[in-house]
């Protein structure tokens, strides 16, 4: 995570440059203080130049071989391990050198400011970790301390140094992101501590093993092979994992697109809804799992339409009450189809209820207000907005503002008002590119779009209210007749 | 001679498991005898406090490791923590700078007991048992112990003595330990692949290549970890045993996640394959049945494990192109559609799958799944084995239906036989018959059918 840094874009006020300068200053002053006090006290400087050289080399190699992007934030930083192990083996000064050199001589192309910041960061991590280690009673003479000494004067101080490094790292990254992109410091800091905290503890433990094997067990530089071999395997598996996750997602979305081919008007619809849903939840601080459940639910929300008779999906013309009932089955059918796919369990409710209405007149279960899962309420808004901004037989595509006006007029009756407001705000930040109906003949021949908000009204009038009236003992036929007028306005064509 | 070989083939798994058990029992008996001071024990037995503690710690670690098994996708089960600890025990020479006196028999006996205990527990708990995997793991550890403690490899002395002379050059000991672990792992792999090859009717070469591809990563981690623990004990004492397993635990954690996403991937493809069936294009469960049949046939025909996944996905998605049809084919049976239509559906399927951008291998198979076999013979066209398998499996399922009776099964086979060599690859049809025989436990009618088949001279039914 320590590599996130530095923007290239010039700013009116050079906050970022100032912050980087400050970081470099802290690095230099810190290393000078630690170096001087070590020189004065005559201890803390690297005792073996050979060990220092080997560790620097290791740092360089392991940093050069790192994976740039393994996705899902589960990378393994070998440099962190090597730098932690360097603390007991070559002291704070040596640890700073190992990290600083690796970053400064990074063989990849890195912008200068970024390289500078990363190097300064590594130096700070080295001396702050090293100083902590010595202050908490860590020893640099591992050879003769015995087993209790190794635990008390190496393991415990090293883990403390590890925690300090994690906090320092998170603080500086949060600082630079604040300077560069204006992200709030507290959120970034806490986010980093919670995502990288566990792996940092692991680095501490492994750094300890490394040091023990190197000095007291007498294996020397060959320890690197023994320690890093299992870790390389772990990293290889993590990379495979990342590949597989990405591959899975693209396979899923492409196959869903395939299912859409049956219904030419909805090509690209799922992908656009998924994008809009992602925009909508950006400001909420949702967990990674919640976001992915949402994205999948959005992508698959209409998958049940595959099960509808083709005549219904493609047929122009009037929808009868029976047709509407069959069509309304798609949301529960979609959820049914996906039951048994473990990772989609959280999305199922979202899919099932994405045609519920805030006023309780939707389908399949007629849930009201807050009873509707929040995922479904978000998808419902995105779904309808996408439909409004496209050409339909009964009307041309609405522009963004007209569509938003329509959405607003339905807030509290059809949609959750809070989410409609969120949509308005989101579209100020992002540019909405509406879908285009490629098959022009489709418009001419008439077509029933179930996502059009008026389809929901039609359903509500024709089915939900009729059922409610039937329950109340009223005459359902009268209502069905009243609904025919609404059907007229939706359907069109020759 | 032939009968003996046949017996060996059929009972190889049992022989390996029994052999491992016998070795374990012998070592336990020898260790107990010499510990109790009975005559006839040239072995060390368990003497001294230090040795007892070391053995106990390893016993617990190995036993716990046995309960934490993992399975890499498409490969055999393994228990990394148990194996690493067992190898470390085999190579433990110094603990807390003091030499521990253990011989091969004692370490092997401890390993045997530690591996047997969880196996007995799972047996009592009626959970699936894995005797054979445990037996091969044990044999690997025993090999390491013998290599390190008994064989005079360095100037007429075993490594365990030679390494005391390398005090100032400990890296030599480290290299020797890694080499011993590596050899033991190779031995373990060979045993397990041989058994697997015989069991799954795989050509031995395919099984070995499979094994090497899958296990090389994990084995590297294991070889390093075993040596790591054995070396660290000098400095840290027995605490080193659990503590130095941390890197391996990380690896194991990563493997679990990887296996998880692979499982998810398969689940997703399986679910999406049902899109055609809820759309009314194909009979219920048709893709799943074709996939199952294809995998079985693929194993018979020596499809390597890493390609089985591709075969499975292709079989599951072979009809996905039907989604593009406006009106479903009657009964969804592509086998009964006109050849041109079959080809078009195949092409649609391939096109849809190719759009994923990540399943190109699957798309390549789907593209040619409807091609008749004579294209290979007459035109020299290269049709991948997987495509030929899916063609036969699909035809069989279309003909036999969702709940085949023995009559419909035979009728289906007969119909397929009519297209043998022209429409269908004879070797693949043979594999289909073998799978059906295995599945039905050797139903007489199918056997009769096989009798006239020149391709089925080898014994097919083992049970």
Image (tube, coloured by chain):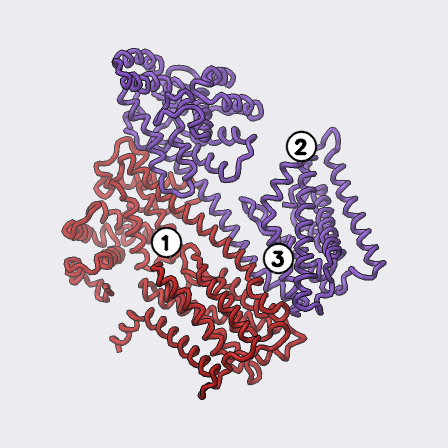
Chain (red): B
**Place of residue B54 in the rendered image (x, y in percent of width and height, measured from the top left):** 54, 72
**Place of residue B84 in the rendered image (x, y in percent of width and height, measured from the top left):** 51, 66
**Place of residue B452 in the rendered image (x, y in percent of width and height, measured from the top left):** 16, 62
Give SS at disc 1: helix
Mark 1: few/some/many CA within 10 Å (<14, 14-19, 20+)? some
Splitting the image into 4 quarters, where does residue B166 fall? bottom right
Q: How many marks?
A: 3
Residue at the spot x=26%, y=39% of the render?
Answer: B282
Which chain contains the residue that carries disc 1?
Answer: B
Q: Pick whichever of labels 2 and 3 is earlier in the sequence.
A: 2
Residue marked by disc 3: A205
- Label 2 or label 3, whichever lies nearer to me, is 3
Q: Quadrant of the N terminus of chain B?
A: bottom left
Q: Is residue B366 above or below residue B182?
A: above
Residue marked by disc 1: B308
Residue marked by disc 2: A182
Q: Is residue A268 visible?
A: no
Quick check: marks 3 and 1 in contact, CB under 8 Å? no
Q: Is residue B449 above or below residue A280?
A: below
Splitting the image into 4 quarters, where does residue B431 fall? bottom left
Quick check: marks 2 and 3 in contact, CB under 8 Å? no
Residue at the spot x=69%, y=36% of the render?
Answer: A8
Q: In screen coordinates, is A367 left or right of A81?
A: left
Distance from the alpha carbon under mark 3 to that under mark 1: 39 Å
Q: In screen coordinates, is B250 left or right of A437?
A: right
Give SS at disc 3: helix
* Identity of the residue furthest to the right in this view: A40
Chain (purple): A
**Place of residue B265 in the rendered image (x, y in percent of width and height, measured from the top left):** 41, 46
Distance from the alpha carbon under mark 2 to that under mark 1: 50 Å
């Amino acid at each position: 995570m320590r590599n996130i840094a530095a923007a290239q874009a010039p700013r009116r006020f050079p906050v970022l440059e100032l912050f980087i300068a400050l970081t470099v200053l802290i690095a230099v002053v810190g290393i000078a203080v630690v170096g001087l006090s070590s020189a004065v006290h005559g201890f803390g400087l690297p005792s073996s130049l050979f060990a220092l050289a080997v560790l620097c080399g290791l740092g360089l190699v392991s940093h050069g071989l790192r994976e740039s992007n393994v996705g899902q934030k589960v990378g393994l930083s070998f440099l962190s391990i090597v730098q932690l192990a360097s603390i007991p083996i070559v002291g704070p000064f040596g640890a700073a050198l190992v990290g600083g050199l690796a970053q400064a001589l990074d063989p990849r192309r890195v912008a200068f400011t970024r390289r500078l910041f990363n190097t300064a960061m590594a130096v700070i991590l080295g001396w702050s970790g090293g100083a902590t280690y010595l202050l908490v009673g860590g020893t640099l003479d591992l050879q003769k301390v015995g087993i209790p000494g190794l635990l008390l004067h190496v393991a415990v101080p090293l883990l403390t140094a590890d925690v300090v490094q994690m906090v320092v790292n998170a603080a500086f990254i949060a600082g630079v992101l604040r300077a560069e992109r204006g992200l709030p410091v507290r959120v970034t800091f806490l986010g980093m501590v919670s995502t990288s905290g566990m792996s940092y503890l692991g680095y501490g433990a492994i750094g300890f093993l490394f040091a023990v094997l190197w000095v007291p067990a007498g294996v020397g530089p060959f320890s690197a092979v023994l320690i890093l071999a299992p870790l390389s395997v772990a990293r290889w598996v993590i990379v495979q994992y990342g590949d597989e996750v990405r591959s899975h997602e693209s396979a899923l979305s492409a196959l869903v697109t395939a299912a859409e081919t049956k219904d030419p008007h909805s090509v690209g619809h799922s992908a656009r809804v998924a994008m809009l849903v992602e925009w909508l939840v950006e400001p909420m601080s949702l967990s990674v799992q919640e976001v992915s459940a949402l994205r999948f639910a959005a992508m698959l929300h209409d998958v049940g339409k595959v099960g509808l008779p083709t005549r219904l999906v493609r047929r122009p013309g009037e929808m009868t009450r029976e047709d509407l009932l069959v069509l309304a089955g798609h949301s529960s059918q979609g959820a049914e189809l996906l039951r048994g796919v473990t990772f989609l369990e959280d999305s199922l409710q979202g899919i099932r209820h994405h045609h519920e209405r805030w006023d309780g007149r939707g389908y399949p279960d007629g849930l009201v207000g807050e009873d509707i899962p929040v995922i479904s309420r978000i998808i419902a808004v995105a779904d309808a907005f996408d439909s409004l901004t496209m050409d339909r037989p009964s009307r041309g595509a609405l522009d963004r503002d007209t569509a938003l006006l329509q959405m607003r007029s339905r807030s509290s009756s059809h949609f959750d008002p809070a989410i409609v407001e969120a949509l308005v705000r989101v579209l100020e930040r992002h540019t909405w590119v509406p879908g285009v109906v490629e098959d022009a003949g489709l418009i001419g021949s008439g077509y029933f779009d179930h996502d059009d908000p008026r389809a929901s009204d039609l359903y509500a009038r024709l089915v939900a209210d009729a059922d409610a009236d039937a329950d109340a003992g009223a005459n359902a036929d009268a209502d069905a007749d009243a609904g025919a007028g609404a059907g007229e306005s939706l359907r069109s064509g020759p | 001679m032939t009968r003996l070989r046949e017996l060996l083939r059929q009972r190889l798994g049992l022989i390996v498991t029994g052999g491992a058990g016998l070795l374990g029992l012998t070592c336990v008996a020898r260790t107990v005898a010499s510990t109790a001071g009975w005559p006839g024990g040239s072995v060390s037995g368990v003497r001294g406090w230090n040795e007892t503690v070391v053995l106990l710690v390893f016993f617990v670690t190995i036993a716990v490791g046995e309960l934490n098994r993992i399975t890499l996708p498409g490969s055999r089960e393994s228990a990394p923590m148990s194996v690493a600890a067992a190898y470390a025990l085999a190579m433990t020479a110094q603990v807390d700078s003091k030499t521990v006196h253990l011989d091969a028999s004692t370490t092997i006996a401890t390993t045997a007991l530690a591996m047997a205990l969880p196996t007995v527990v799972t047996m009592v708990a009626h959970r699936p048992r894995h005797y054979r995997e445990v037996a091969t793991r044990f044999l690997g550890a025993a090999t390491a112990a013998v290599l390190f403690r008994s064989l005079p490899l360095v100037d007429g002395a075993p490594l365990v003595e030679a390494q005391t002379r390398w005090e100032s050059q400990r890296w030599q000991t480290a290299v020797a330990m890694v080499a011993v672990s590596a050899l033991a792992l190779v031995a373990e792999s060979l045993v397990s692949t041989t058994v697997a090859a015989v069991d799954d009717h795989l050509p031995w070469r395919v099984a070995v290549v499979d094994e090497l591809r899958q296990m090389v990563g994990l084995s590297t981690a294991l070889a390093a970890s075993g040596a790591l623990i054995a070396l660290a004990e000098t400095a840290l004492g027995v605490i080193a045993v659990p503590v130095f397993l941390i890197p391996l635990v990380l690896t194991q954690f990563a493997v679990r996640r990887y296996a998880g996403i692979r499982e998810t991937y398969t689940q997703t493809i399986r679910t999406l394959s049902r899109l055609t069936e809820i759309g009314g294009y194909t009979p219920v469960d048709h893709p799943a049945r074709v996939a199952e049949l294809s995998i079985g046939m693929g194993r018979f025909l020596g499809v390597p494990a890493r390609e089985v996944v591709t075969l499975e996905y292709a079989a599951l998605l072979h009809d996905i192109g039907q989604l593009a049809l406006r009106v479903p084919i009657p009964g969804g049976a592509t086998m009964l559609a006109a050849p041109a239509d079959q080809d078009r559906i195949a092409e649609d399927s391939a096109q849809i799958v190719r759009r994923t951008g990540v399943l190109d291998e699957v798309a390549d198979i789907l593209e040619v799944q409807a091609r008749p076999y004579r294209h290979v013979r007459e035109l020299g066209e290269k049709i991948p084995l997987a495509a030929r398998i899916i063609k036969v499996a699909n035809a069989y399922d279309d003909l036999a239906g969702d709940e085949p009776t023995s009559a419909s099964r035979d009728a289906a086979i007969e119909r397929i036989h009519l297209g043998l060599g022209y429409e269908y690859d004879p070797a693949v049809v043979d594999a289909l018959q073998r799978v059906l025989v295995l599945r039905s436990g050797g139903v007489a009618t199918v056997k009769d059918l096989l009798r006239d088949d020149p391709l089925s001279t080898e014994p097919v039914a083992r049970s």
